[in-house]
Amino acid sequence: MANYYCKCCGTKYTDLPTMLMEDCRYSASGKHQLFEGVAKNKFYCCYCGIKFNELRSLCLNSCNYSPTKHHVAYIGEEKKEYQCQFCGQSYKDLHTLCISPCRNSQSGRHFPAK
Ligand SMILES: [Zn+2]
Ligand SMILES: [Zn+2]
Ligand SMILES: [Zn+2]
C-alpha cells in the first residue's frame, strides 16, 4: 500500500484524497501538499543538505538557509554526486553544495538539481 506524505508538515497518509482535503498549518496554501519525491528513511533538506530520518522532523525544524525558515525536502534521489542546478558544479556531499556560494544563483548559494 502506498504512503503519501505532506511536504509541508511531513504527515503520512495512506489515502491521497483525504490528505488533500485536510488543512495544514505549515502550508502556504493552508492545505497539505503532496511530497513528490521518493519517501524512504532518509530525507535531505534542499537548502542546507541536513539529513533527517523522518520527513516530519525535517518539516518541523527551522532552517537558516531556507527562504521560508523551514527545511524543505529534497525530492531527488540519493546520489554519489549532487549538481547545482544553476551552475552545474558538482559536490559529493549535499550539505557542502548547499552552503557553498554560487555566482549564478539568485540566493547566492548553490541549489541541488533533481
Ligand atoms: Zn501538511
Ligand atoms: Zn534546511
Ligand atoms: Zn551553483
Image (tube, rainbow, N blue to C red):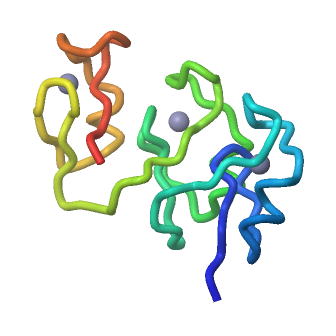
Q: Position of residue 5 (x, y in %)?
A: 66, 62
The quadrant of the image that shows the N terminus is bottom right
Q: Quadrant of residue 52?
A: bottom right
Residue 15's place in the image compared with 11, above or below, is below
Residue 4 percent coordinates (x, y): 66, 68
Percent coordinates x, y for residue 79 in the rendering: 24, 61
Residue drawn at x 76%, y 60% as measured from the top left:
11
Q: Name which quarter of the figure residue 97 lies in.
A: top left
> Which residue is at the front of the view, 44 or 77?
77
Residue 58 or 77: which is nearer the viewer?
77
Relative height, residue 113 to residue 109 (above, below): below
Which sits in the foreground, 16 or 109? 16
Q: Quadrant of ligand 3?
A: top left
Residue 34 left/right relative to 28 = left
Residue shown at 13%/25% (left/top)?
87
| Residue at left offset 35%, top offset 40% | 95
Q: Position of residue 112 (x, y in %)?
A: 30, 38
Q: Quadrant of residue 20?
A: bottom right
- From what the image shows, is residue 37 above or below residue 29? below
Does residue 37 appear to the left or right of 9 in the view shown? Answer: left
Q: Horizontally, is 18 left or right of 102 in the view? A: right
Task: Count all numbered tags in the image, as a single digit.
Answer: 0
Instruction: Say whether residue 100 is left or right of residue 48.
Output: left
Q: Is residue 107 positioned above or below 76 on the image?
A: above
